Image (spheres, rainbow, N blue to C red):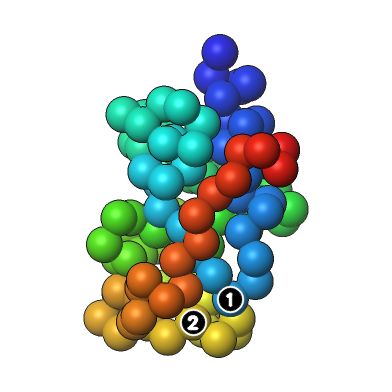
Amino acid sequence: MEDNFFEKVYAIAKQIPCGRVTSYGAIAKALGTARSARMVGWAMNASHNREDIPAHRVVNRKGILSGKHHFQGTNLMQQLLESEGIEVMDNQIVNFEKVFWKPDVSKL
């Protein structure tokens, strides 16, 4: 089940537009498994060897870069987000509500 779940998570993550972010919980909710935000986080952590998964665009429900320690380099996650025009201050997305993207599983 885990591999299939991870692939569903990746399918949603690939849809996140450049310059936008979503949360672990939003992905879990879109998949109909609202209580599995932590498992979405595990999927994102497992995706770092896959360049086709924009894991840097997935943050926690408050817009905090909670997964940043899984990226190589001290501030790689922040640098990737900032290169897409997303402002980050003190490890948190500025104007999180404005750049938040709600997943749509109907487009899978």
Amino acid on which disc 1 is placed: Gly
Label for residue 74? Answer: none
Dot 2 falls on a residue whose secondary structure is loop
Position of residue 107 measured from the top left corner of the image (x, y, whole percent): 71, 43
Q: Is residue 52 left or right of residue 37?
A: right
Dot 2, crowdedness within 10 Å: few (<14), some or many (≥20)? Answer: many
Q: CA distance from mark 2 to mark 1?
A: 6 Å
Which residue: 54% across, 19% down? 2
Q: Residue 59 appears in which quarter of the rendering?
A: bottom left
**Residue that numbered label 2 is attached to:** 86
- Occupied quadrant, residue 39: top left
Give amino acid for label 2. Answer: Ile
- Left of 46 or right of it: where is 17? right
Mark 2–mark 1 contact, CB under 8 Å?
yes
Name the image quarter holding the C terminus: top right
User: What secondary structure is marked by label 1?
Assistant: loop
Circle 1 crowding by C-alpha within 10 Å: few under 14, some 14–19, many from 20: some
Report which quarter residue 37 is drawn in: top left
